């Protein structure tokens, strides 16, 4: 009896199937390696950014007023800013009031002490693509505690850019936290806007930028990103005055432009109408504009242009308004754990 073997067609089919399996396995393996590389890169970025932000915060906390203009040419201020906010200079009281600087140079964060050469506080393994300092309460004799917000963005390898932000208050007390009242030279209307600002205009009050809308409500600038917080229905459907609600508490505890009665804007109608205070603000100040209205404005991150309202939608969601194209002015809701922007109002 003759031995039977495989035909040529059978061999070709087997080889084809084997090739497909091998290519698939190799593809999965390569994708896994790329994913692992991205995860390791992201871990490295977060680790270095956390260190850099913590290092800068600890030093910035020790700032004191430069009364002699020895570090920068503006007397009686705690911080001096580079153009565009890409760097900051201050006197560190913890180190004999030495002038110190943080700034962005060659995609690295540099730290300078006195007349020493700048040193890197981030490694060459990551690229700092954006560094910005925003200072409030820094005007001489404004009776406000200086606050520095640091915004940083970094990338490494092929991993997507990662953005982190933190705020730090000067440790040395520089403000009187007694009962807040408007200055006598700046009388206030019943609904909240100072005479000389508004309606439908912006201006500076006690060193801080404010906006007055057509309903004589006073608004702050962008104050950062926070979670709404909380996981249960609020008894009043609002987070105003409720503890452990970061978005609302930012406004509840805010001292800005000489006032302490700020609130997170409401949106009780849950839709685009006059009963949504936050939507009204977008309609008046932001429709068709992308300047001071959205600070900072970053088209790659719509979270920075989505603002929380104080109104709750359900036990897990709260109402927010999108300030970015193509959803500009859209009133929606999202999970309370989302990190969205905050802007405060008085007189709503």
Image (spheres, helix red, strand yellow):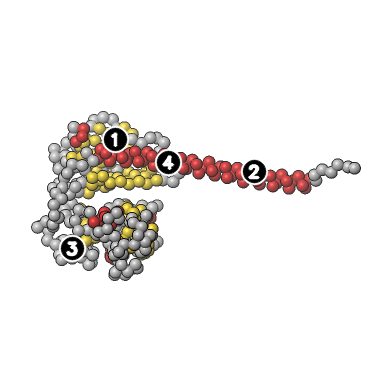
Q: Determine whether label 2 and label 1 are within 8 Å by CB.
A: no
For mark 1, what is the residue?
111
Q: Name the N-terminal-most of marks 4 and 2.
A: 2
**Can residue 73 be seen at all in this image of the molecule?**
no
Q: Name the N-terminal-most of marks 4 and 3.
A: 4
For mark 2, what is the residue?
22
Secondary structure beneath label 3: loop
Check disc 4: other Cα within 10 Å, few if <14, some if 14-19, many if 20+: some
Closer mark to the observer between disc 1 and disc 3: 3
Secondary structure beneath label 1: strand
Q: Quadrant of the N terminus?
A: top right
Residue located at (19% from left, 36% from top): 93
Residue 24, given in percent of the width and then of the height, sits at 62, 46
Q: Name the N-terminal-most of marks 4 and 1.
A: 4
Q: Name the N-terminal-most of marks 2 and 1.
A: 2
Whole-Å distance between the Cαs marked 4 and 1?
23 Å
For mark 4, what is the residue?
43
Residue located at (34% from left, 38% from top): 51
Q: Residue furthest top?
A: 116
For mark 3, what is the residue?
192
Secondary structure beneath label 2: helix
| 65 left or right, relative to 15 | left
Residue located at (44% from left, 46% from top): 160
Residue located at (41% from left, 45% from top): 161
């Amino acid at each position: 009896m003759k031995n039977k073997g495989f035909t040529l067609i059978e061999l070709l089919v087997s080889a084809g199937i084997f090739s497909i399996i091998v290519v698939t396995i190799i593809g999965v393996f390569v994708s896994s390696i790329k994913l692992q590389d991205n995860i390791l890169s992201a871990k490295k970025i977060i680790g270095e950014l956390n260190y850099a932000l913590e290092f800068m915060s600890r030093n910035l906390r020790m700032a004191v007023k430069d009364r002699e203009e020895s570090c920068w040419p503006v007397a009686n201020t705690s911080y001096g800013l580079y153009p565009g906010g890409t760097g900051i200079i201050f006197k560190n009281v913890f180190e004999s009031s030495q002038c110190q600087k943080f700034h962005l140079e060659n995609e690295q964060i540099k730290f300078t002490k006195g007349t020493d050469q700048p040193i890197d506080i981030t490694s060459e393994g990551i690229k700092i693509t954006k560094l910005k300092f925003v200072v409030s309460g820094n005007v001489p004799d404004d009776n406000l505690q200086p606050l520095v917000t640091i915004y940083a963005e970094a990338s490494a390898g092929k991993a997507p850019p990662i953005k982190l932000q933190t705020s730090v208050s000067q440790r040395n007390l520089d403000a009187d936290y007694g009962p807040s009242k408007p200055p006598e030279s700046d009388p206030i209307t019943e609904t909240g806007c100072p005479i000389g600002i508004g309606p439908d205009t912006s201006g500076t009050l006690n060193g801080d930028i404010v906006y007055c809308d057509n309903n004589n409500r006073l608004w702050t600038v962008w104050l950062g990103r926070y979670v709404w917080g909380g996981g249960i229905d609020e008894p009043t459907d609002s987070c105003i005055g409720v503890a452990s609600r970061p978005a609302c508490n930012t406004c509840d505890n805010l001292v800005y432009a000489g006032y302490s009665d700020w609130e997170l804007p409401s949106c009780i109608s849950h839709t685009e109408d006059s009963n949504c205070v936050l939507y009204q603000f977008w309609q008046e100040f932001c429709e068709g504009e992308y300047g001071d209205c959205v600070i900072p404005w970053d088209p790659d991150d719509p979270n920075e242009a989505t603002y929380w309202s104080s109104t709750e939608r359900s036990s897990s969601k709260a109402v927010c308004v999108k300030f970015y194209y193509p959803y500009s002015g859209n009133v929606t809701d999202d999970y309370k754990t989302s990190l969205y922007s905050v802007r405060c109002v008085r007189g709503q």
